Every structure is written in structure tokens, then in C-alpha cells.
Image: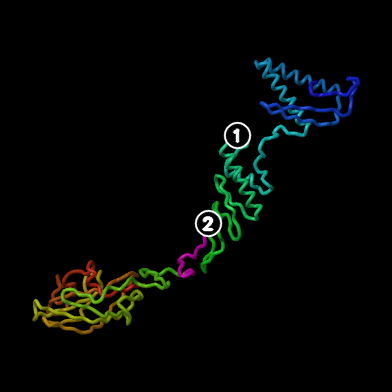
């Protein structure tokens, strides 16, 4: 048989001893030659069986319409495989390592799943490149003591320290804001429900309608400008519950208001005038804090009154109006007990002199 150099002696008796197995693999100009010395034993029955099997395969191939060249190539492939096996080489010699081989870290299996690489599909050039890059980065991370975090497609992040792999990205689990805890669903540190971050702490939300100030306190919006002037009336020095013109008050509570005023009526020096007040969004004024004849020279003074905070939380503005009547609300349209003499001030901020943040 070609390639087998048999020791001298009779062929009909089994022989044991050294022999040379020589394989030549030719590809273009490259010739690789492998030699190995092994102990061979030639038994006539096995050789005859081998030759009969190859003969049968050749006969079936020719009967099936396969050319003699292809049939011989198939048989030759089997002989080459047997020869390589005798040299200790598998028939996948030279092929890439199968997925999951990595360096014992399990990178291969994870990277194969992430990239969709199929080692049996020879057309997956790009996928194979992604798989190889994934395994390389994964192994490097594990070797350095990190924790590989592999995303779909094979991208690798190396988690270190307090980081964990969360939603395919490395996330820090140590929270720097007092009161926060790590949320494994959103992969970030979060304050408890109903709180927000301010000044490095989790603090309760400001009650509506107040807003958060830089010092983390809650406050109403900026106060209306002062003094306020409308229809010959000027309002100044407004104080709500002893403070400024803006205050946070409880719903339904009694609120004390004080202010200074000045009123003139040059068009009608002998007319009786009033200054009404109330919540800007109400359909009618609440009361009046001036009822007199100011004339063209005018009249000035201070006034104080109480209002009841609305029952619903929100921002409410106190407004004023100028009236010319015989008394407060004497001649309201339709005989109403109270009214805005010149119309509602809801859309006229120039008539707002104080703000209540009702909580």
C-alpha cells in the first residue's frame, strides 16, 4: 500500500516493529511533511477488510454517476484522514477553537450567544470577527480581576470595584447621596418615592404650589412688585402674617394682612370712594378697607384685615379695586352683596398686592 514501508518477512504472518508513516500535504507551492515512527502490526484479515471496504465505496460511487476522479478523491480523503489520525492530528486541525474555549472563564459561550457566531457557518466573517474581539476583551477583563459585562453584539465593558453588570453596562452600586439606594432595574442610585435630591440629601418634595430654593427650602414664587398703583390707588408695605407680601399658609386658616395705602380722586373731588380687596380669581371682592372722600389732595393711611385661606392647595393672589359708590358694595350689579367695581382682576397682575401659598 502506498505510504506504508513494511518490514521484511512473509506477508501471511503478522509482523510487529517500527515503521514510517509519511504524509505529504501539498497546497500550491507549500509542502508540509510529517514523519512519525510508530509500532505497526499488519494483520492480513484487517488489511483485507479495509481494502474491501474501499473497493465497495468506489463501486457504489461509480454506480451513482460520480466521475472516477471524484470517487478517487473521496477514497483518498478517507486514507488521508486515517493517516492524519495516526500522526495524532484531528481532522479539524487548523480550524478555529470552538466557542466556549476561552481561557477557562466562560467567555466563549457568552460571546457566542451575544454575537450569534456559528462556527459551522463559514460565511460569518463579520460575526466571527466580533466573536473573536469579544472573547479577547472578556478574557483580558477576567485576567485583570474585573467582571466582564457583555452586551448584545459582543461589546464588552469591564466592571471593577463596586460596579456590577446591569442592563449590559457597568453601574456603580455605591450611592453618594444620603438616603439613596441602588435600583437594579434602572441601574442607578435613587431617592425613595416622594423625595428628591438637594444639597447631597434626599429631601421631601416641596408641597404644591411652593418651589425649591437653592438652600433646599420650599417657598412661594417671587412676591408682586411694590408699591402697586391702579386707578389712583397706591398700595405699599404689604405684610402677610407678620412677614412679607408672600406667605405659605395652611388650607382654611385665617390669614392676617396689613398694608399702607394712598388714594386720590381729582376727576370727582367730592365723590365717595372705596378700596376693595379679595382673591383675584374670585367672582367678587371680599370686603373694603377704605370708604371716604379723598378729593384731589388724596388720603393716606394703614389698614389691616383678615382673609380665610382657600381649602384647596395652590397659589392665590390678593387683589384690590377702586370703587365710587355711596358705601362698600351698595350698588353692585344685580343687587349682589359684593362685587369688583371695575371688573375682575384675575387677568390683571397690576392689581395683585400679595400671594398666599396654600398647603
Q: Main secondary structure of the magenta part?
A: strand
Is residue 236 rendered to the left or right of residue 137?
Answer: left
Q: Position of residue 55 (x, y in %)?
A: 75, 18
Toward the viewer: 80 or 173? 80
Numbered disc 1: secondary structure: loop
Residue at numbered disc 2: 185
357 inside magenta stretch? no
At 14% from the left edge and 77% from the top edge, which residue is drawn?
330
Q: Position of residue 326 (x, y in %)?
A: 12, 79
- Residue at the extreme bottom of the image, as rendered: 301
Depicted 332 relative to depicted 27: above or below: below
Is residue 188 rendered to the left or right of residue 262?
Answer: right
Depicted 36 relative to depicted 161: above or below: above
Query: Residue 237 shows which numbered tag?
Result: none
At 26% from the left edge and 74% from the top edge, which residue is drawn?
225
Report how many numbered discs are placed on residues in the image: 2
Residue at numbered disc 1: 121
Q: Position of residue 107 (x, y in %)?
A: 64, 47
Instruction: Tell me the magenta residue range.
Output: 188-202
Q: Quarter holding the C terminus? A: bottom left
For the residues labelled 2 and 1, the Cα–Cα distance comes to: 36 Å
The answer to which image quadrant residue 85 occupies is top right
* Closer to viewer: mark 2 or mark 1: 1
Q: Position of residue 274 (x, y in %)?
A: 16, 79
Toward the viewer: 202 or 251? 202
Depicted 229 relative to depicted 122: above or below: below
At 33% from the left edge and 77% from the top edge, which residue is drawn?
253
Q: Residues within 10 Å of mark 2 (few under 14, many from 20)?
A: few
Numbered disc 2: secondary structure: loop
At 57% from the left edge and 52% from the top edge, which residue is drawn?
157
The answer to which image quadrant residue 292 occupies is bottom left
The answer to which image quadrant residue 342 occupies is bottom left
Amino acid at each position: 500500500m502506498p505510504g506504508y514501508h513494511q518490514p521484511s518477512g512473509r506477508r501471511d504472518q503478522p509482523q510487529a516493529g517500527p515503521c514510517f508513516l509519511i504524509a505529504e500535504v501539498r497546497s500550491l507551492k507549500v509542502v508540509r511533511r510529517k514523519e512519525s515512527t510508530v509500532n505497526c502490526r499488519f494483520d492480513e484479515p484487517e488489511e483485507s477488510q479495509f481494502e474491501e471496504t474501499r473497493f465497495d465505496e468506489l463501486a457504489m460511487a461509480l454506480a451513482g454517476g460520480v466521475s472516477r476522479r471524484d470517487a478517487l478523491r473521496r477514497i483518498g480523503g478517507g486514507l488521508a484522514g486515517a493517516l492524519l489520525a495516526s500522526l495524532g492530528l484531528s481532522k479539524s486541525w487548523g480550524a478555529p477553537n470552538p466557542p466556549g474555549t476561552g481561557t477557562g472563564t466562560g467567555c466563549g459561550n457568552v460571546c457566542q450567544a451575544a454575537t450569534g457566531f456559528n462556527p459551522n457557518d463559514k460565511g460569518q466573517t463579520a460575526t466571527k470577527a466580533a466573536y473573536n474581539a469579544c472573547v479577547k476583551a472578556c478574557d483580558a477583563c477576567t485576567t485583570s480581576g474585573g467582571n466582564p459585562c457583555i452586551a448584545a453584539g459582543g461589546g464588552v465593558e469591564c466592571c471593577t470595584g463596586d460596579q456590577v453588570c446591569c442592563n449590559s453596562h457597568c453601574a456603580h452600586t455605591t450611592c453618594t447621596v444620603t438616603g439613596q439606594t441602588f435600583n437594579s432595574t434602572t441601574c442607578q442610585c435613587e431617592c425613595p418615592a416622594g423625595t428628591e435630591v438637594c444639597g447631597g440629601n434626599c429631601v421631601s418634595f416641596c408641597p404644591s404650589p411652593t418651589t425649591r430654593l437653592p438652600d433646599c427650602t420650599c417657598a412661594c414664587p417671587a412676591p408682586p412688585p411694590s408699591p402697586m398703583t391702579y386707578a389712583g390707588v397706591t398700595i405699599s408695605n404689604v405684610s402677610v402674617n407678620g412677614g412679607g407680601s408672600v406667605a405659605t399658609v395652611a388650607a382654611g386658616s385665617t390669614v392676617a394682612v396689613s398694608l399702607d395705602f394712598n388714594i386720590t380722586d381729582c376727576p370727582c373731588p367730592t365723590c365717595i370712594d372705596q378700596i376693595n380687596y379679595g382673591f383675584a380669581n374670585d367672582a367678587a371682592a371680599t370686603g373694603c378697607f377704605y370708604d371716604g372722600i379723598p378729593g384731589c389732595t388724596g388720603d393716606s393711611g394703614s389698614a389691616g384685615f383678615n382673609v380665610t385661606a382657600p381649602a384647596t392647595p395652590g397659589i392665590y393672589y390678593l387683589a384690590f379695586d377702586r370703587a365710587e359708590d355711596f358705601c362698600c358694595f351698595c350698588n353692585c350689579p344685580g343687587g349682589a352683596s359684593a362685587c369688583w367695581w371695575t371688573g375682575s382682576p384675575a387677568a390683571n397682575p397690576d392689581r395683585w398686592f400679595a400671594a398666599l401659598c396654600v398647603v
